[in-house]
Image (cartoon, grey):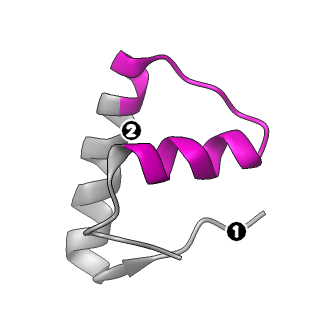
Amino acid sequence: MLTARSGRSALAYRFKNLGYEFDRNQVDELYQQFLNVADAKKKYRIVT
């Protein structure tokens, strides 16, 4: 489970396990979007 306290590396690692790879800039953008959702929900689960 990823939370608002999960870091960029944790997010990138989870995406990689799901078969997605992003460069550093893409991870930064995804992380900002993730934080916005995670802050609103407090918990966010990426489901396969």
Residue beneath disc 2: 30
Rate crowding at label 1 as few (under 14), some (14 to 19) or many (20 or more) other CA atoms within 10 Å: few
Seen in the image, is 29 located left or right of residue 23? left
User: What separation in Å lies between label 2 and label 1 (alpha carbons)?
Assistant: 16 Å
Q: Amino acid at mark 2?
A: Leu
Q: Callout 1, which amino acid? A: Val
The quadrant of the rendering that contains the C terminus is: bottom right
Instruction: Give, as a single range, the part of the protein colored magenta.
Output: 9-27
Q: Main secondary structure of the magenta part?
A: helix
Q: Nearer the viewer, residue 26 or 37?
A: 26
Percent position of residue 10, x then y: 46, 53
Q: Quadrant of residue 15?
A: top right
State the residue at coordinates (70%, 33%).
20
What secondary structure is found at the residue carrying circle 1? loop
For disc 1, the marked residue is: 47
Q: Which mark is residue 1?
A: none
Does the stretch in magenta take in 44?
no
Report helix, strand or loop for mark 2. helix
Question: Upstream in the sequence, badge 2 or badge 1?
Answer: 2
Bin the neighbour count of mark 2 within 10 Å (Cα to Cα): few under 14, some 14-19, many 20 and up: some
- Horizontal side of 42 relative to 45 (left or right) equals left
For residue 39, which quarter of the picture? bottom left
Tell me where residue 45 sits by quadrant.
Answer: bottom right
**Residue 8: x %, y % from top left:** 35, 44
**In the image, residue 47 lies at what x, y percent?**
70, 68
Please tell me whether residue 36 is drawn above or below residue 17 in the rendered image: below
The location of residue 21, given as percent across then percent down, is 64, 26
